[in-house]
Amino acid sequence: MTSTLQAPPGEAGPPPTRPGPGRRALALARNTWRGLTSMRTALILLFLLAVAALPGALLPQRTPSPNAVDDYLTQHPTLGPFFDDLGLFDVFATPWFAAIYLLLFVSLIGCLVPRSFEHVRGLRAEPVSVPRNLARLPHHAQGSSDEDPDAVVDAARRRLRGWKVAVRSEPGGVRTLSAEKGALREVGNLVFHLSLVALLGGIAVGKLVGYEGQVIVMADGSEFCNSGIYAYDSFRPGLQVDGTGLDPFCLTVDDFRATFRPDGQPDSFDATVRYQDTDAVERGDGAWQQHDLAVNAPLRVDGERVYLLGHGYAPRFTVTFPNGEQRVGLIQWRPVDQATLLSEGATKIDPPGVTDESERRRSQLAITGLFAPTSSGGGLVTSVFPAPNDPEVAVDVLRGDLGLDSGRAQSIFSVDQGMVEQGRLVRVARENIKPGGEITLDDGTRIRFDGVENWVSLQVSHDPAQTAVLLAAIALLGGLTLSLTVRRRRFWVRASPTLPSTTDGRTLVVLGGLARTDRAGYGEEFGRLAADLVPPRDDTGDGERGRARPDPAVPEDELDELHDDEVPEGPAPDRKDDDGR
Amino acid sequence: MVVDAQLGQFGDLLFGSALAVYVLAMILHAVEHALLRRTGTEEESAARVPVAAGVTGAAARADEGLSAEGAVVAADLDEQDAREADAPARRPRSRAERFGRTGVSLTVLGFGLHLAMLVVRGLAAQRVPWGNMYEFTAAISLVAVGAWLVVLRRRPELRRLGAFVLLPVIVLMFLAGTVLYTQTAPVVPALRSYWLVVHVSAAVIASGILLLAGVASCLYLLRAAHESSGRFAWTSRLPSADVLDRVAYRATAIAFPIWTFAVITGAIWAEAAWGRYWGWDPKETTAFIAWIVYACYLHARSTAGWRGRRAAVINVVGFAVMVFNLFFVNLVVTGLHSYAGVG
Ligand code: HEM
């Protein structure tokens, strides 16, 4: 039970002398393979896997939260880059993490294949013959019967329905019966481990051919089509995905509703969308179907799933230029406070009808600042509630060169501060306005805050292997449950004709039982079997008869864990479950 | 979604009462333990041979045949014990025993209050009562106590573990009632799904049972150290190391598939809510680590040289990961699983 158990033999290095380098190499290879597929190696690799995954829990990871990684890097200027070099912010994509699980799966397959063959052989083999001395087994009982040995064994066979049974004869008219049950445990174990391999395979396929894209769509009937990577705001392709040949479905977001509890906690979100699946798009007959997209209720079209991930506001501004022309600015602002949905952003507007480049660079407009769905009022606007009950914007209007064609990537949520610092973009107004309110600029340009639209952030995911992963997971769970609940146990009967001189019936019946797994509780079942097969007799004073008499010095459960090769004088022992592989 | 505030407050009251009753029960168990230290070897031998209790009664039931004697009885104790225990005792009960039994009764009472608290809380919020950390922790403790009562029913001789099982339960509940406390409220949309019920229930059940396993493995380590080197003399009144080892193993073997189920249903839910079945969110990562550690434990149990002490250490590590998952990941790390915002 404790560490006093001996290490299994056969895993040491190669024997001292071996002729020929070829055979030595072979032996080395064989020993390496044996070492790799041993239970101990599996254990150590599993342990390493847990340790290697640890930074993934302790440090922010790029995959789910890239911003958190950037924050961490700025907060830890020395340690951060060092961790980064080690790949600690991308643990699950590092070569060392892959090395561990690949080794583990090689070990697993190396261990499974021979084990499966062996199990199939074992299924066909007969139950092992009866050990000579049943009295030394952890469970045993003894009694007598008035029937002859054949009848006793037949009765036992009938009683042991569902067990795998073999009946044999021994010299002197002795009949024996060997029975086994619980082969499902091993089946479960193999199914479990095979499912692990299948699961990993499924995940790998998903990583190769799947993709994920995010896009923000205005909830005012705007349309999104899955026509290529360019349609997305961000796109994460699988290794084999080049962005061509996506299923070209389209959807429009007609409406979005959010409800909040009085304390500002979100209560429900849903968006009404219409979509055309790939067929409809290709037929071009304009058949749209409606769907209510909500958190936990994605839209599943063809091989794609569309999720509602988040939402926010887009203030709508109408700019009336001195010449009377109008431009509408409507772009998403991003929430800076998830609880109140106070948002920031920059609505950028090109003046109409300006063809001269330098003129254009002097007259571009940006409306930037904060949007409060439910304004606190007062000079310093902030938001007190996430629903658009009393919207207000606190904006700066900037005019000049937005730097949009400078070639530098620019956030859609802010203006290029470099332009502001160089004085090429100047503030021409600062005001808080409510819907319907207007700002008039020095040149007569009027900016009206019309109101607010909702936008939704959608994610499109594609993973053709995920059903296979789910099936593997279900098989895994089934196998695991079998392997942890089924008990493997053996039951033996030896029925010997008694000497004519004895008064005790005609047949001496000795029963023995052995559980081969870690779980106890065979005692009870054995007791019931024994009670049925050799019922205690009332007519004799011998209280011992027909009663199990285990060795009281050894706790039953401990003996349960003995394996067959520990059975005294037993037949050729099965291979031990533990080691030697 | 209406929230019945008064009912919610009643739930809080029940929570407080359950906690108080558990504390009392733990004290009684501790007194039992202390008294055992002083009384003589008679108690000790009873503690060491779990069968002893059964044997007393066995004589009276000899006519019931086979199972009435010796070690075979051990398995039968399950049903026997209750009847035996209530039969007029042949030997006057020792003071320690009276304390212990009262401790068990109080634990049952506390369990009832605790259960009522979760039911009331669920009624008040009109949803399953594990939508936030407070309720989640309360539910885990409930399962741990429930699992403990099941163990007690099957193996009454383990009673003297009572104080050690109740201690972490009390600590958890104390934290739940103070640091983690939240008013009765509906859950955010991302959490409103029947997968919440399935996934979180499984996680709660597995965690509660694993708590029991963790306690058994901790005590195993102390007890095994005592058996080999004589340190930790106070553990001599505990059940033997083998018994502790087996309790830990069985609890883990039951909880592991449930935990696996929790992880799988979590992935199914994540697929519906977040667009991917697995994304290495901190909570997912930690759940994975815990799963691997418990897989290590089960492997260790069947690897020569790793049974016993090393396996027990792995089991304790597994439980540490579970606790880390519950507290650190929920409170410190912000991932999708934070119970506050939308995903
Ligand atoms: C990929 C990672 C692995 C995981 C997560 C894993 C998990 C498990 C679990 C949970 C069990 C317990 C089920 C039981 O007791 O019947 C188990 C048992 C077992 N595993 Fe693995 N395993 C892994 C890899 C391996 C490898 C590489 C080997 C081969 C060396 C292996 C060989 C075994 C054997 C022989 C058992 C049965 C032990 C027994 O009969 O009690 N496993 N495994």
Image (cartoon, rainbow, N blue to C red):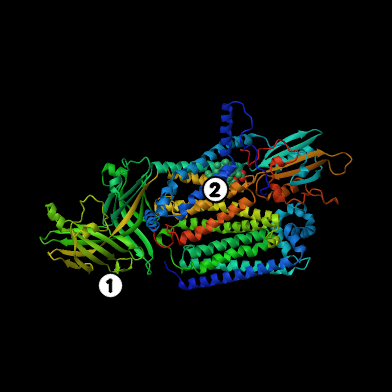
Which residue type does callout 2 highlight? Phe
Q: Is residue A178 left or right of residue A347?
A: right
The residue that mark 2 highlights is A47
Q: In this view, does B342 lie to the left or right of B99?
A: left
* Disc 1 element: loop
The numbered mark, 2 or 1, whose residue comes first in the sequence reads 2
Say the numbered circle drawn on residue A377. Answer: 1
Image quadrant in which you'd find residue A326: bottom left
Instruction: Write the residue at 51% across / 40% down.
Output: A103
Within 10 Å of disc 2 (Cα), the crowding (few <14, some 14-19, many 20+) is many
The quadrant of the rendering that contains the N terminus of chain B is bottom left
Q: Nearer the viewer, residue B89 or A156?
A: B89
Instruction: Write the residue at 58% across / 29% down.
Output: A24
Q: Which of B12 and A299 is in front in this view?
A: B12
Q: Where is residue B18 in the image (x, y as percent from the top left)?
A: 57, 69
Q: Can residue A464 be seen in this view?
A: no
Spatial CA span between label 2 and label 1: 58 Å
Q: Can residue B223 be seen in this view?
A: yes
Q: Kindly identify which chain the residue marked by label 1 belongs to.
A: A
Same-subunit check for callouts 2 and 1 = yes
In the displayed orientation, state which residue is furthest to the right: A501
Q: Where is residue A6 in the image (x, y as percent from the top left)?
A: 67, 43
Instruction: Write the residue at 47% across / 63% down.
Output: B132
The quadrant of the rendering that contains the C terminus of chain B is bottom left
Please count the marks in the image.
2
